Amino acid sequence: LEDGKWKVPGLTPVHELPDELKLEEDEDEDELTSFGGFVTRELGRIPEKGETVNLQHLKVTILEADETRVLSTEVILSDEPSVQGEEE
């Protein structure tokens, strides 16, 4: 996509994300393998299609999700500090 914006499939392995999107990982990160899993874990739930959340240095918009996982996201680098929550 355009500069500073990426389309990231939910199944993308976290370690394969572009350097700009690298996540601050906890030490017990072994169980976290996919970007969709990261989003779900950070929120404590599976987000809905169309939802936008701020996670760490990223603004993540859910493009596709089903009842079990995140399928596709759009990610923008955010200047805002990490705040969980939804934007209207």
Image: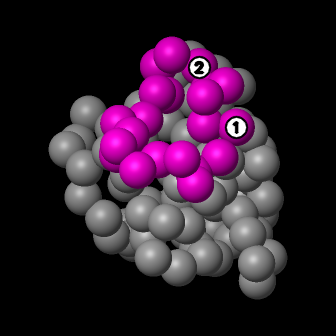
Confirm whether the magenta stretch covers residue 46: no
**Mark 1 Cα-neighbour bin, 10 Å: few <14, some 14–19, many ≥20:** some
- Of the numbered discs 2 and 1, the one sitting upstream in the chain is 1
- Which amino acid is tagged 2? Pro
- The N terminus lies in which quarter of the figure? top right
What amino acid is labelled 1 in the image? Pro
The x and y percentages for residue 14 are 61, 37
Compare residues 71 and 75 and report the one nearer the observer: 71
Identify the residue at horizontal 65%, vertical 55% (top origin).
36
Quarter of image, res 58: top left
What is the span of residues highlighted in magenta in the rendered image?
13-33
Render colour scheme: one colour
Q: What whole-number distance in Å separates the C-alpha atoms at marks 2 and 1?
A: 11 Å
- Residue 65 visible in rendering: yes
Residue sitting farthest toward the bottom:
67
Q: Would you name the residue on which mark 2 appears? A: 18
Choose mark 2 or mark 1, whichever is in front. 1
Q: Secondary structure at mark 2?
A: loop
* Residue in view at x 35 percent, y 36 percent: 24
Horizontal and vertical percent position of residue 52: 49, 62
Residue 30 appears at what percent x and percent y? 54, 47
The C terminus lies in which quarter of the figure?
bottom left
The residue pinned by badge 1 equals 13
Q: Is residue 7 above or below residue 60?
A: above
Residue ID at (58%, 54%): 31
For the point 41% across and 50% down, the residue is: 28
